Structures are given as structure tokens and as C-alpha cells.
Amino acid sequence: MNHATEPLMPELGGTYRMSITVGEHSARHIRAILHTFLHSWGLPELVDGAGLALTELVANVVRHVPDRRCAVLILRRPEGLRVEVYDGVAACPGPVRGGDPLAETGRGLLLVEAVTDRWGVDPSPHTGGGKTIWFECDGPGPGLGW
């Protein structure tokens, strides 16, 4: 089930934001940044799923955003992690259900859905459109040390 999350708690800290023009190999570098934060926050169990989800969102920017510009936000939450990827294209994607099982594209958001606890797409409130695709991964449980 996809839904927006409650407001973030600013006292938690743990926020990283970058604006970048991505290319074919950018996901690897952005994923390394995510891994560094997850380890420093004591959430190494989220590395694989969050890394795969982030890779898929960056790949969508490379494939579907003409200028390949995006902003990536990594947030530490009381329950775990939230990652947002904003781009300037207003079209909101959704997971492709069915379709050609041998197709090389069209399943990225199904992967995001499979490896995260929540995800969604929010249209940008800014002039000029765009959207933010986000996902959340919950940590190991209560008492995460915050």
C-alpha cells in the first residue's frame, strides 16, 4: 500500500541532498553515498533494498528525463529511511503489470515496490511541474537509538 508519510522530525538530523545531472554510471556513485549514510546510521540491513530502489529511480531519470537533471534527498527517519528523487518531468509513472515478461524495461517500479515498505509519486507544487518519486524502508524495529 502506498501512502505519504507523516512530517519529518527535524531533530533527527541525518539529511543529505544533492542536485545532479545523471548519466549511465551515476547510480553507482549515488548508491555508494546512500550506503555510507546507512552504515553511519546503524542501518546496514537496508543497504541492498534501498540501493536497488535508488538505482531504479536514477535509471528512470536517465531514460525518461530529457535533461537528466534531478535532485536526490536521503533522510533518516525514526522508523528507518526515506529517499526522494525529484525531476522536472510532470508525467507520473506507475508499475507496469503484465506485459511482455521478456521486455528489458518497464519493471523498475515493481522492483521498488518489492524491496521497500512504501513508495509513491507526488506532483511538484513548484511552477514548471515535475514530480518527486519517493520510497521508505523501515529499520529493524523500535528503539533504533534515536
Image (cartoon, rainbow, N blue to C red):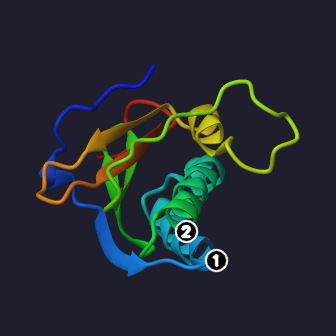
Marks 2 and 1 close (CB-CB < 8 Å): yes
Instruction: Tell me the element at label 1.
Output: loop
Residue 124 picture location, percent across and down: 21, 49
Residue placed under numbered mark 2 in the picture: 62
- Relative to 44, residue 106 above or below: above
* Residue count near mark 1 (Cα–Cα under 10 Å), binned few <14, some 14–19, many ≥20: few
Q: Name the disc covering residue 37, or none.
A: none
The amino acid on which the numbered mark 2 sits, given as a three-letter code, is Val
- Residue 75, image quadrant: bottom left
Residue placed under numbered mark 1 in the picture: 24
Sequence-wise, the earlier of marks 2 and 1 is 1
* 75 or 128, nearer to the observer: 128
Q: Residue at x 26, y 43 (%)?
A: 123
Q: Residue at x 56, y 79 (%)?
A: 23
Q: Is residue 70 left or right of residue 44?
A: left
Q: CA distance from mark 2 to mark 1?
A: 7 Å
The amino acid on which the numbered mark 1 sits, given as a three-letter code, is Glu
